[in-house]
Amino acid sequence: MPRFAANLSTLFTDLPLPERITAAKEVGFKGVEIQFPYHVDAARLADMVACAELSMVLFNAPPGDWEAGERGLAAVPGREQEFRDGLELALHYAELLDCPRLHVMAGIVDEDDIDAAFDTYVANLAYAADEALAQDVKILIEPINPVDMPGYFMTRPEDALTVLEAVDHKNLYLQYDLYHAQMVQGGLTDFLEANMARIAHMQVASVPGRHEPDANSEINYRYLFNLIDAHGYNGWIGCEYKPRINTRTGLRWAKEWGIG
Ligand SMILES: O=C(O)[C@@H](O)C(=O)CO
Ligand SMILES: [Mg+2]
């Protein structure tokens, strides 16, 4: 049976964070993920998650100035020190939250700077993978589609494989968000079957719309969840979607997986 995690940044968003955590527990999730936890004290968040007997399975390193349009710093030349400072903060959160995965966002890069960005990305990821290994935290990279995030450095799953090969570090993995993958190239079954061992986390949502991974999607999620399970994937599947109406009503798709 696949293990599903509630994304606290996209589900139960009508509730304050402590209640989102208890709501996730109530409907049957065993794990939670959050995009950016830094507005809450790490120890306090860890207490909330532990009290609900949930696992924190993933969050993102600080992305730079989100309000100003930044979407990560890992591939942004000249920002190496800020990247390292953010990583240090993220690893502090990971330690208190006992979280074994950290997603490091690449950032928005100008087309003229692609070569320098690639070199910066490879060097920063090698550094992050080394630092996190000491703490037993996996570093993850996620291709994000350019419709939702114009200018993002890494958009295609195939590009992520090139980066994994260039960095060549045992602590660097792919975060395969099937929504983004379908938006840019599809071929989900072939990609999953060829690369399951490099994937340390998945996320799901419908295409189009980024809603529930249910039958109202061009992606056949029931088929894919069974396929993923049959291949012995032992990571989590993050429910990173925008509910059509509200989170609880929308969880009908998850009943057969023991949630809702
Ligand atoms: O898919 C996404 O956008 C997220 O997984 C993320 O981490 C950045 O917003
Ligand atoms: Mg995602």
Image (cartoon, rainbow, N blue to C red):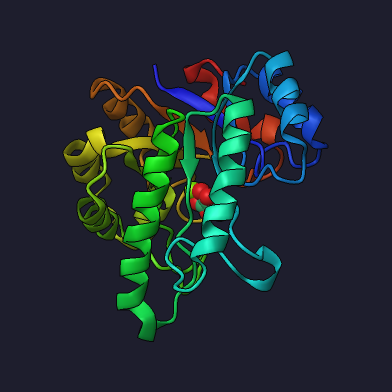
Answer above or below: position of 4 versus 146: above
Q: In this picture, is 164 found above or below 225?
A: below
| Residue 155 visible in the shown view | no
- Residue 138: x %, y % from top left: 40, 35
Foreground residue, 139 or 24? 139
Task: Kindly identify the residue that appears in the image at 57 percent across and 61 percent down.
Answer: 82
Q: Is residue 205 left or right of 52 when viewed as pictured?
A: left
Which residue lies at the image location 58% right of the left edge and 58% below the top edge?
63
Q: Quadrant of residue 29?
A: top right
Can residue 132 be seen in the rendering of this structure?
yes
Going by the picture, which residue comes out furthest to the bottom? Answer: 112
Identify the residue at horizontal 68%, vertical 31% (top origin): 249
On the image, the x and y values in percent for residue 3 come to 45, 22
Q: Nearer the viewer, residue 162 or 234?
A: 162
Q: Nearer the viewer, residue 260 or 126?
A: 126
Q: Position of residue 146 (x, y in %)?
A: 44, 68
Viewer-proximal residue, 131 or 8? 131
Q: Look at the image and tell me in which quarter the C terminus lies.
A: top right
Position of 168 relative to 17 (above/below): below
**Residue drawn at 38 percent across, 81 percent down:** 113
Quarter of the image for residue 174 reads top left
Instruction: Quadrant for the N terminus, please.
Output: top left
Image position of 136 with respect to 199: above or below: above
